[in-house]
Amino acid sequence: MEKIREKDPRVENHELELSKILSDALIKATDTYSLPPQIIWIDNSTIATFGNFSASTGKAKSKKTFNLTALVAASLANKQVLQYRAKLPEGKRRILYVDTEQSRYHCRNVLDRILRLAGLPSTVDNENLDFIGLREYSPSLRIKIIDYALSHNKGYGLVIIDGIRDLMLDINNAGESVEVINKLMQWSSIYDLHIHCVLHLNKGDDNVRGHIGTELNNKAETVLVISKSSQDNNISEVRSMHIRDKDFSPFAFRIDENGLPEEVCDYSFDQHVPKKIKNSYIDLTEAQHRAALEYAFGGRPIKGFDNMIEALIKGYAAIGFERKRSITIQLLQYLQEELKLIVKQGKCYHYETVPMDKGLFENED
């Protein structure tokens, strides 16, 4: 008589776990969901909601951290600082600020700046702000510490990770990048909060650094870019690189005599608007096409035809080549079939960075 095999309890437990996950993940037509709370705005554009994450980026010395202190101060005081207007709901007023790269001395300076911008005493600990420095720890331990802090402290509505690059060993490692992004999505979803990260731009161009930068661009609710003004080295400009909501008007700030960021209200961005190009897209140089496409793609693939056309309109307008939808559709076809600069894979469009055939640009100097 054949002996009946008993089911391995480990397999049974694993199947029960998968069954529960599948049940929890099922979205039904009878389900109802409320819009996630909006917590931070610039003008009337929402840049942060619960259950999502965002990022700010910029090159070295662009004053990214000064800009970040304004965003945090607005969230801490539930008021407007620079152009950031914030309102964290009751029960979710607490902020966790994680710095991965600065010394404790410099972290204390950032903390002081946040409190002063918020109009709060800078010599008294605030119950709604936890500031931790993780410079001396390994990437894996940093992740565990953040995980522990979130699971053992209630009331966090905003988490700042100043130096997301330091949560991994290699920013160009696809596996590590996906794991970190999955952690951000997991934390923001499970604990119903918003996470804002800081990442550097490449030195040689205006793309976010590494594979983690590409993943951030693909998944983030908003990506802000902070850059030095070409008009005045003491002024920094804030723009959107990527935003799900409607775009906002850029703004500028400088550092005042008290070491705090202040808005430059009379700043003109007009000098940055390129002269309009009147010739055909066929006559554009390689450099002009590449500049437009780098702006349009922002280091990420674009999903959907309509999104691709809208991105091209904005990208080419940024170099002064302003055209409407009908011409832009022809331009997309030209970029795909003639220049091979855009490749479509499934529903997504990708920018090809491989050098073009110089024969296509014989008119270029």
Image (cartoon, rainbow, N blue to C red):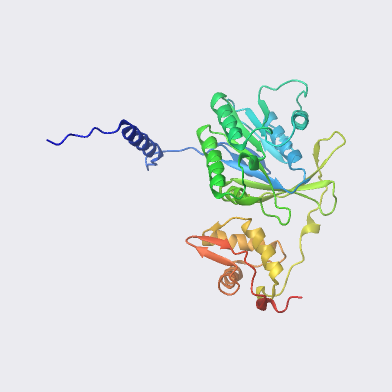
Q: Is residue 222 above or below residue 87?
A: below
Residue found at the very far top of the displayed protein: 124
Name the residue: 76% across, 63% down. Answer: 274
Name the residue: 37% across, 37% down. Answer: 18
Q: Indicate the position of residue 67 as horizontal and vertical percent values.
A: 74, 40
Residue nearest the viewer, comparing 23 with 324: 23
Residue found at the very far left of the displayed protein: 1
Q: Quadrant of residue 327?
A: bottom right
**Res. 71 in view:** yes
Name the residue: 51% across, 39% down. Answer: 35
Say left or right for 297 vs 69. Answer: left
Q: Indicate the position of residue 131 as horizontal and vertical percent values.
A: 68, 28
**Res. 82 in view:** no
Residue found at the very far right of the displayed protein: 257
Say left or right for 349 vs 117. Answer: left
Residue nearest the viewer, comparing 118 with 103: 103
Q: Quadrant of residue 354?
A: bottom right
Q: Considering the image in quadrants, where does the C terminus appear?
A: bottom right
Q: Considering the image in quadrants, where does the N terminus appear?
A: top left
Q: Indicate the position of residue 217 as horizontal and vertical percent values.
A: 60, 50
Q: Indicate the position of residue 305 as horizontal and vertical percent values.
A: 52, 62
Name the residue: 77% across, 43% down. Answer: 63
Say left or right for 172 vs 126. Answer: left
